[in-house]
Amino acid sequence: MPVFRDHAIVLRTQKLGEADRIITALTRAHGQRRIVARGVRKINSKIGARLEPFNIVDLLAFEGRSGLDSLNQVDSLALFGAEISLDFDRYRAASIMAETAIQLTEMDASVHQFNLLSAALKALAGREQAPELLRDSYLLRSLALAGWTVELRSCVVCGSRDNLTHFSVQHGGVVCDNCATPAMSRISFAEYELLAALLIGAWVRVNNSDASSRQHVSDLIAAFVRWQLERGLKSLTIDEIARRAEQQRGNRGERV
Ligand SMILES: [Zn+2]
């Protein structure tokens, strides 16, 4: 059975049977994995605490054929989970990041996604920035890595660089005054600046923003992420259906 060793971020854990857990983890070089950790829920298990969500570990696992790997060894690299769990706002932000990472890296993981999430969790655990701002910056940047960069330089409808006064969730970017429709959200210059600063992690500018801009921008980012992920999942489903139809046709030996 092939074996691999890698750094991994624990994204989610699920109970399995009496004493085991299934760990969903994002690794540096082996993508997103689901790994069975045996005996970790026993009271005297030494490794259970290492496998809490948001921790970063060094693990050795056997690759399973059914998509479930089997954990052999695990050492802790950074135990962010305990620190993050002390504070509900941080825990909630980390949970949203981890769930988004699960969706974004299910089919297409990269070392950049691993590095981005590691840095965001480190900043959350270290109380470097407000949790909502770390969450929003992470969401914009992880979506950008997945190919869904929010467009802030020019109007997503006509390409104009002037009077960028609105934001369209469906178009994924800013819209000029001429192209705006009533369904789009008007954004102030301060909100535009905040979006741009979150996208590149310009924290001095982010921290200078006002509370009402933060709230509105946060709502826009949440709507943008939801829209993109749902669209992504739909296209995934259509691909899946097409692939299955192809397989069935192949099985029956049919020709188009
Ligand atoms: Zn326009």
Image (cartoon, rainbow, N blue to C red):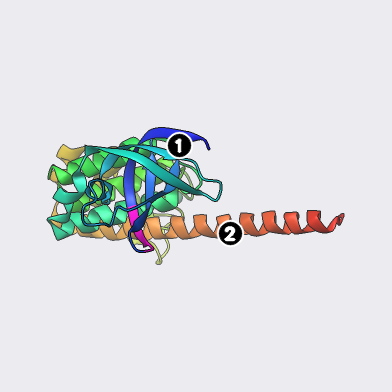
Q: Amino acid at mark 1?
A: His
Residue 193 in view:
yes
Is-magenta flag for residue 21? no
The magenta stretch is 12-17
Q: Residue at x 17, y 55 (%)?
A: 85
Horizontal relation, residue 139 to residue 170: left or right: left
Tally the marks: 2
Looking at the image, is mark 2 or mark 1 earlier in the sequence?
1
Q: Quadrant of residue 55?
A: top left
- What residue is shown at x 16% (from left), y 45% (from top)? 125
Q: Position of residue 70 (x, y in %)?
A: 43, 46
On the image, the x and y values in percent for residue 31 come to 45, 40
Q: Callout 2: 10 Å neighbours few (<14), some, many (20+)? A: few
Q: Which mark is residue 30?
A: 1
Tell me residue 237's x, y (percent).
Answer: 58, 59
Q: Pick the residue in front: 200 or 13.
A: 13
Where residue 237 is drawn, which disc sits there? 2
Q: Position of residue 12 (x, y in %)?
A: 34, 54
The answer to whether residue 105 is seen in the rendering is no
Residue at image coords 16%, 60%:
88
Relative vertical location of residue 153 with respect to residue 135 in this rendering, above or below: above
Residue at screen point 34% across, 38% down: 73
Vertical arrangement, residue 69 with respect to residue 247, above or below: above
Q: Mark 2 and mark 1: span between their CA atoms?
A: 23 Å
